[in-house]
Amino acid sequence: MRKRGMRGCFAFAAICRVMTRTLAQRMFAPNSREGLMLDHVGLKVTDLRRSRAFFDKALKPLGISVLYEGTGAENGGTPFIGYGEGFKPYFWLNEQPRATERVHVAFATESRAKVDAFYAAAMAAGGTDFGPPGPRPHYHPHYYGAFVLDPDGHNIEAVCHAPA
C-alpha cells in the first residue's frame, strides 16, 4: 500500500475547505437557484379553489404566481395548478380527497421585507400563525423567516438568508 505524504493531506484539506465554502455560498445565497437539487414539489389539497385563494395572495409578495392550470384530463387525474416564477412552475397543488400529510415548504426570498409581506398576505388570506416574522439565529446568524399554516395545515414559510 502506498503511503501518502503530508503534502497530499494538505491538498485534500484545502479542497475540502473550498468545497465547503462553495456549498455554504449556494445554500445561503439569497434568491439563487444555482446548485439546487429539487426541481419541484407537489402537495395534495382537499379543496383546490380554497387553496388557490390562499396561495395566490400569500405568494404574490414573493413574485410567485400560477403558471399552469390543469383540469386533470391531461394526466387522467384531478385538477391541479403549478406556481412559479418566469416560465417554470415548481410548487404544485393537486386536488385529492385526502391532503398530503402535513409538510413544511419554505420559499426563499432576497429581503426581510418580502418575508414580512408574505406573512401579512398569508394571514389576510386566512392562514394560521405558526411563527411571526423574525430572526431565527438557532438556524444560522442571518436566518429570517415567517411561518403560516395553509388551509390544509401545511407549514408554509418565507425565508431570507441575507444579512440585515
Image: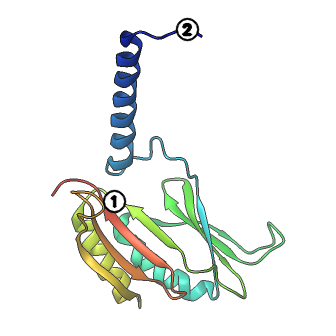
**Circle 1 residue:** 109
The location of residue 129, given as percent across then percent down, is 35, 87
Query: Residue at horizontal 59%, vertical 86%?
Result: 49
Residue furthest right as drawn: 76
**Circle 2 residue:** 2
The location of residue 60, given as percent across then percent down, is 39, 71
Q: Amino acid at mark 2?
A: Arg
The location of residue 107, given as percent across then percent down, is 41, 64
32 in relation to 20, above or below: below
The location of residue 148, given as percent across then percent down, is 39, 81
The count of marks equals 2
- The C terminus is located in which quarter? bottom left
91 in relation to 79, above or below: above
Mark 2, Cα crowd under 10 Å, few <14 / some 14-19 / many 20+, is few
User: Which callout, 2 or 1, points at the residue further toward the start of the chain?
Assistant: 2
Q: Nearer the viewer, mark 2 or mark 1?
A: 2
Left or right: 45 as drawn, with respect to 140: right
Q: Amino acid at mark 1?
A: Thr
84 in relation to 16, above or below: below
Answer whether labels 2 and 1 touch (C-beta < 8 Å). no
- Please name the colour scheme applied to the rendered image: rainbow
- The N terminus is located in which quarter? top right
59 in relation to 143, above or below: below
Q: What secondary structure is marked by label 2? A: loop
Kindly identify which numbered label has been placed on residue 140. none
Mark 1, Cα crowd under 10 Å, few <14 / some 14-19 / many 20+, is many
Query: Residue at horizontal 25%, vertical 73%?
Result: 116
Q: What secondary structure is marked by label 1? A: loop
Left or right: 109 as drawn, with respect to 154: left
User: How far apart, in angstroms, are the residues tagged by discs 2 and 1?
Assistant: 50 Å
Q: Which quadrant of the figure has residue 70?
A: bottom right
